[in-house]
Image (spheres, rainbow, N blue to C red):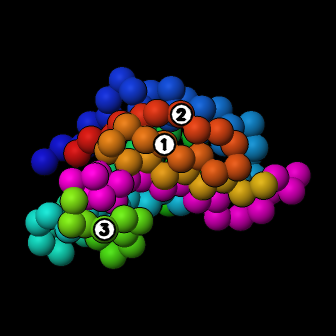
Amino acid sequence: MRSRRTQESKPVLDEVAQFTNRCKAIRVEISGHTDTDGGKSFNQDLLSERRARAVAAALIDKGLGKDRLTTVGFGYSRPVAENKTEEGKAENRRIEFNRKNKSMFGLVGIKLAISNDHALELRGLKACRVLIRQ
């Protein structure tokens, strides 16, 4: 199994990288999430953690220091929607970016949630569309 980023994810990752590179004090946690399809070990260890590491690798390639990023996989332990429908499952397959510290400029924290249904929620900044697939 290999994580891959689609062309649709490139502009979002570019924007996250640009924002984070401008604000050198920011540390970011990248968390991977899944739906309930598959077993707990598969979703936790393989899918969600690989998803988060793939996004971190892309941001490192864009110039972010490895020491500013942490990754974690939550599997299906933090759903944002019911896993009973395909739409709900699609919402739960996502990546979230969470700022781990306050910057010296007092910037408002950002939280992004990227789901497989092409939706990106960027709370506090703006919305756009992206897809990150496993």
Q: Of label 3 and label 2, which has the lower sequence position?
A: 3
Q: Secondary structure at mark 1?
A: strand
Classed neighbour count for the residue bearing mark 1: other residues with Cα under 10 Å, few (<14), some (14–19), many (≥20): many
- Tell me which residue sits at (60%, 32%) in the image: 15
> SS for tag 3?
loop
Cα distance in 3D space between marks 1 and 3? 18 Å
Query: What residue span does the magenta drawing correspond to?
Result: 86-107
Please, is residue 22 above or below residue 50 in the view? Answer: above
- Residue 23 image offset from top left, x and y in percent: 75, 44
Find residue 128 and name its label.
2
Q: Secondary structure at mark 2?
A: strand
Q: Position of residue 42 (x, y in %)?
A: 15, 66
Badge 1 amino acid: Leu
Crowding at mark 2 (Cα within 10 Å: few <14, some 14-19, many 20+): few
Which circle, 3 or 2, is nearer the viewer?
3
Residue that badge 1 annotates: 120
* Left or right, residue 105 beside residue 90: right
Q: Position of residue 83 (x, y in %)?
A: 25, 66
| Label whose residue precedes the other's in the sequence (1 or 2) | 1
Q: Amino acid at mark 2?
A: Cys
- First in sequence: mark 1 vs mark 3: 3
Query: On the image, numbered disc 3 is attached to which residue?
Result: 82
Q: Is residue 64 visible?
A: yes
Locate residue 19 relative to residue 5 in the image: left or right: right
